[in-house]
Image (tube, helix red, strand yellow):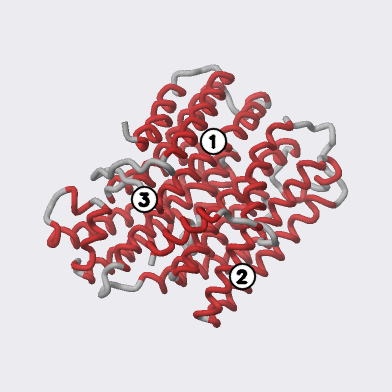
């Protein structure tokens, strides 16, 4: 059996099984074991490349994202075990909610992995839409007025966006059909990319505009980002971690696949300037908005908009070094932001509030948690020697070498965002404690946070040669 069938089959079967299990203890273990099995199986894709089919394929680009997605899915399931258990004990969730949560969590992993491995452009769209639907249901899990409003906002805005992406996908098919004929080959990415130089350039150009707006909504690019802060703030924190750390990557991956098709057609619209403009506007908007956030989850939701802007900007610039920086930043942001949400999840549970004003002096009341949170924030702010600093340095230096004037707003945005995060974090960590030190949490709940931070710090000082060569190969593919 092809390995990618196993990678997809494990979360799909686990989702169905978890829908039948009512015991919290059993469903928690099944969720963790299924996530670990999926991650362990995905690692096999690094060493064994399954045969390409019209529906599924693996190449250098998607295999790294598949492994990253499965890894963060596993660590988040471990964190989720303690978080959800406490939510149940405090009466925020009932038994029915928990069964639904675990089943949807595995369904979400399945849809994201399917989107990454889909060779058929239509199947990729269906998978991204499936990921939207599963996360909409989880955002509304608490059934509060705010959670339901956030879920509806998320559903409506992303459905409009994904409908535009569908129209763009149809236009790509219409451009491919005269050259490749009707049938599944005209929808298979591996065939389309080889023939795209012969496609009608005006159709491809129009398609990319719809795809950029459609998938850009899912990425959370300004001015299409309105759903993102609400969805992050009102859903369970483990879902905020995978939304920010994984789903945004998957949507951007879909957009990059279409960018590669356009880039292979010399007469079509150059996608780079559009991506540069949207990436830069997202970075600058989010950097200023960080100063006005009083909700700790919304604060880091806007931080995600900032970083997706940086990544989109890097891929828009194109070229070997910028693409390398974009790939590295995708990976570092995924690991760091999910680590921050792990810490935020514990903090909001022991503080009983998401309001930053009500959370003070973590370094005194809960030293290990407080210092770990601080390191994670410094990492996402781009302080050396963390991995995010390395990728941001590459983005700025490669931009300065090619377009010096564009490097100035990038550096300004990074500095403004850095100042906001430090300003907001200092009282959270260092002022007079507002949380009773008697408020306890399970020490093992920090294990996923430590694992992510260790990788981010390691990447800042040393990248293994095979990983560098891998990123170089993918950067070359992206053009």
Q: Is residue 111 above or below residue 398?
A: above
The quadrant of the rendering that contains the C terminus is bottom left
The residue identified by callout 2 is 413
Q: Quadrant of residue 239?
A: top right
> Element under label 2?
helix
Q: Is residue 441 left or right of residue 20?
A: right
Residue 368 percent coordinates (x, y) = 79, 41
Question: Residue at point 57% right, 77% down?
Answer: 407
Spatial separation of the CA atoms under disc 3 and disc 1: 22 Å
Residue depth check, mark 2 versus mark 1: number of the one nearer the observer: 1
**What residue is pinned by disc 1?**
74
Q: Does label 2 or label 1 sit earlier along the sequence?
A: 1
Residue 181 relative to residue 35: left or right: left
Residue 98 vertical position relative to residue 378 in the rendered view, above or below: above
Q: Which sits earlier in the primary sequence, circle 2 or circle 3?
A: 3
* Residue at screen point 44% across, 19% down: 20
Q: Is residue 24 above or below residue 322?
A: above
Q: Is 456 situated left or right of 106 in this image?
A: right
Q: Which mark is residue 335?
A: none
Q: Are marks 2 and 3 in contact (CB under 8 Å)?
A: no
User: Within 10 angstroms of label 2, few (less than 14), some, or many (20 or more) residues?
Assistant: many
Name the spot of residue 290 as percent of width and height, x first.
Answer: 65, 61
For the residues labelled 2 and 3, the Cα–Cα distance comes to: 34 Å
Quadrant of the image occupied by residue 50: top left
Q: Earlier in the sequence, mark 3 or mark 1?
A: 3
Image quadrant assignment for residue 252: bottom left
Q: Residue at x 35, y 63 (%)?
A: 259
Q: Secondary structure at mark 3?
A: loop
Residue 59, disc: 3
Q: Closer to the camera, 6 or 314? A: 6
Along the viewing direction, whichever of 467 and 347 lies nearer the viewer: 467
Q: Tag 1, which secondary structure? A: helix
């Amino acid at each position: 059996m092809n390995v990618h069938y196993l990678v997809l089959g494990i979360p799909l079967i686990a989702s169905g099984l978890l829908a039948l299990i009512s015991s919290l203890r059993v469903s928690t273990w099944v969720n963790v074991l299924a996530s670990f099995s999926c991650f362990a199986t995905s690692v096999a894709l690094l060493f064994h490349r399954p045969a390409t089919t019209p529906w599924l394929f693996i190449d250098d680009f998607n295999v790294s994202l598949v492994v990253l997605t499965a890894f963060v899915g596993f660590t988040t399931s471990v964190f989720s075990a303690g978080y959800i258990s406490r939510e149940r004990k405090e009466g925020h969730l009932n038994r029915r909610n928990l069964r639904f949560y675990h089943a949807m969590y595995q369904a979400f992993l399945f849809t994201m992995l399917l989107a990454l491995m889909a060779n058929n452009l239509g199947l990729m769209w269906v998978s991204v839409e499936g990921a939207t639907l599963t996360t909409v249901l989880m955002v509304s899990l608490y059934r509060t007025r705010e959670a339901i409003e956030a879920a509806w906002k998320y559903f409506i805005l992303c459905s409009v966006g994904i409908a535009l992406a569908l129209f763009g996908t149809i236009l790509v098919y219409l451009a491919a059909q005269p050259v490749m004929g009707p049938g599944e080959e005209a929808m298979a990415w591996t065939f389309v990319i080889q023939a795209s130089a012969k496609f009608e350039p005006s159709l491809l150009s129009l398609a990319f505009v719809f795809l950029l707006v459609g998938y850009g909504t899912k990425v959370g690019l300004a001015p299409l980002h309105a759903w993102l802060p609400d969805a992050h703030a009102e859903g369970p924190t483990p879902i905020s971690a995978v939304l920010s750390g994984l789903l945004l990557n998957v949507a951007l991956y879909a957009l990059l696949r279409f960018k590669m098709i356009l880039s292979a057609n010399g007469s079509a619209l150059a996608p780079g300037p559009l991506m540069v403009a949207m990436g830069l506007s997202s970075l600058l908007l989010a950097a200023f908005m960080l100063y006005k956030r009083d909700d700790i989850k919304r604060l880091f939701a806007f931080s995600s908009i900032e970083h997706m802007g940086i990544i989109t900007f890097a891929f828009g610039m194109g070229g070997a070094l910028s693409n390398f920086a974009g790939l590295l930043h995708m990976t570092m942001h995924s690991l760091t932001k999910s680590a921050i949400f792990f810490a935020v999840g514990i903090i909001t549970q022991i503080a009983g509030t998401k309001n930053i004003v009500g959370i003070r002096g973590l370094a005194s009341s809960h030293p290990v948690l407080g210092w770990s949170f601080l390191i994670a924030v410094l990492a996402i702010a781009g302080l050396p020697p963390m991995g995010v600093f390395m990728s941001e340095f590459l983005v700025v230096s490669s931009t300065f070498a090619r377009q010096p004037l564009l490097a100035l707003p990038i550096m300004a945005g990074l500095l403004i965002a850095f100042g906001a995060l430090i300003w907001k974090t200092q009282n959270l960590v260092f002022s007079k404690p507002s949380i009773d030190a008697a408020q306890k949490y399970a020490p093992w709940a920090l294990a996923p946070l430590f694992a992510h931070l260790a990788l981010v710090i390691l990447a800042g000082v040393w990248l293994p040669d095979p990983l560098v060569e891998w990123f170089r190969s993918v950067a070359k593919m992206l053009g």
